[in-house]
Amino acid sequence: MRDWLAIRADATPDATALAAAADVETTTSYAALDRRVETLAGRLSARCLGVGDRLAVCAGTRVEFVELVHAAQRLGATLVPLHAQSTTAELDDRLARVNPETVVCEADTEAAVQSATDGPMLSVDEPTGGAERLADVDPEPFDLPEWGPDDPLVVAFTSGTTGDPAGVVLTLANVLASATASAFRLSVDPADCWHVTLPMAHMGGLAPVYRSVVYGTALSVQRSFEPAATVAALRAADATCLSLVPTMLDRLLDAEPLPDLRVVLLGGAPCPPDLLTRAHDRGVPVAPTYGMTETASQVATARPETAAAHPASVGTPLMFVELSVVDEAGTACAPGESGEFVVRGAPVTPGYLDDDRTAAAFCQDGLRTGDRGYRDEAGRVYVEGRVDDTIVTGGENVDPAEVAAVLQRHPGVEECAVVALPDEEWGERVGALVVRDGEVSAADLRGHCRDRLAAFKRPRTVAFAADLPRTPSGTVDRTAVHRRLADARE
């Protein structure tokens, strides 16, 4: 199989590949994008990138990132997307694990990349340090590889909400199966334009780049999310589809009226039912989804009409994905019974960079996700949290999601995160980091919980923040929450 862009440019050369909006000045056809990628691949080839090599890209969401995604596939190389906000220490760790042939950076990331690697560096911008400007490299001829379904296409790092990001290997078959399954669930309109403002270092931002080429639809990109600018970009691109995390949707709903959209894919964190109701009341077609890096994006997704009827659910598993719920012994749970999600199927990764991690993660039923929830009698999926989030205090088990739900029913709480904190007497205690909505004190919240939670479930440590710390993919950064609560006095 040739690279997907080459196939697409041959099939629909005049179709729009990149829509003019936000950071893109002119509309680009698939034929034109194919020519640009061919030149870019030649430049990368001149710097010794080829079949089986790894190309690390540390940059924000931008057109150049899209072109590098396709150039890597054209050369038969494995893409390693790295977040533009990564620290030198984080880059040092990631680059040591993947050992890339070449690292591509941008002006904003050049200094951090240079501090983290002694290898070749290329920049999509005018260099400010030791990188070579990619546009100045003379292209060289290269041999076209033939892709097999099990060839590694991407190595993507997980968000690392617990401080230990994993390098996930995704094959061509994984990504293609995910794109196909997404089309079956959400459908595809030839006039679609998917707007991307999420980081392309994560599958939420990267998957639409691959999907759009498979579908032959348009893509628009925006370097960073800002509600008013995003609304303007959606209108300029005639965008029909959008990927967001719940906090972004909440801010977007506070902005000026949104244009008509076909679907808003909402993931990265559980969506509060009231936010979902608010969106549907505004005519915004939200499709809540549960996904993982390890499944190349979505595991289960609810169509907007299903989400409106069942706002607490993320729908049913996508085509090619089998999702089971098991207890601690690995026995299947009955409908309505909570347990750990286990997934298997064509979109599921064959494993991690670390063989020991791979061996620990897989069981006879598939990949143990570490996520907890249940399925109802109709097969709908409900996500409750992480398996390892359970707080054990004085021998009693506390579900952080239950505590968070009680706190969020207080009118003075906008959102919160509940975690376990070490306790000399009880082993662990319940801690809560709260974002206020108005005036509320820790004493107020303890009083609110007194009649609603057993004593051992009540937060003993409460602190307040302007916002919950989040990973770039939008999930709550639990490690950062622990740090903020460590010195709390309330």
Image: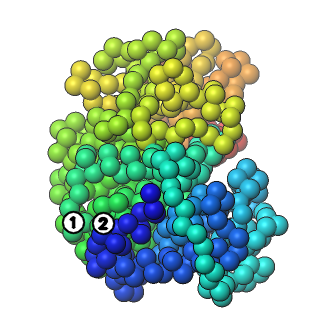
Q: Is residue 104 left or right of residue 41?
A: right
- In-front residue for pair 34/267: 34
For the question of whether residue 213 can be seen, the reply is yes
Position of residue 256 measured from the top left corner of the image (x, y, whole percent): 27, 71
> Residue 390, relative to residue 352: is it above or below?
above
Q: Which residue is mark 2?
A: 216
Which residue is pictured at 30% across the width and 38% down the height?
319
Amino acid tagged 1: Pro
**In which quarter of the view is residue 165 placed?**
top right
Secondary structure under tag 1 reads loop
Q: Residue furthest right?
A: 118
Residue 408 in the image: above or below residue 143: above
Residue 286 spot, x, y in % from top left: 26, 51
Foreground of the two, 273 or 456: 273
Point out which mark residue 112 bears.
none
109 vs 275: above or below: below
- Front in this rendered view, residue 85 or 3: 3
Location of residue 372 with respect to 162 vertically, above or below: above
Q: Work out whether residue 265 or residue 308 is closer to the camera in this orientation and state it.
A: 265
Residue drawn at point x = 33 percent, y = 14 percent:
334
Secondary element at tag 2: loop
Label 2 Cα neighbours within 10 Å, binned few <14 / some 14-19 / many ≥20:
many
Q: Amino acid at mark 2?
A: Gly
Residue 135: where, in percent of width, then height?
61, 85
What residue is shown with label 1? 190
Give the alpha-carbon distance from disc 2 to disc 1, as whole Å.
7 Å
In the rendered image, the quadrant that contains the N terminus is bottom left
Q: Kindly indicate whether the residue at mark 1 contacts the one at mark 2 (C-beta within 8 angstroms).
A: yes
Q: Residue at x 66, y 43 (%)?
A: 353
- Of pointers 2 and 1, the one earlier in the residue sequence: 1
Left or right relative to 351: residue 15: left
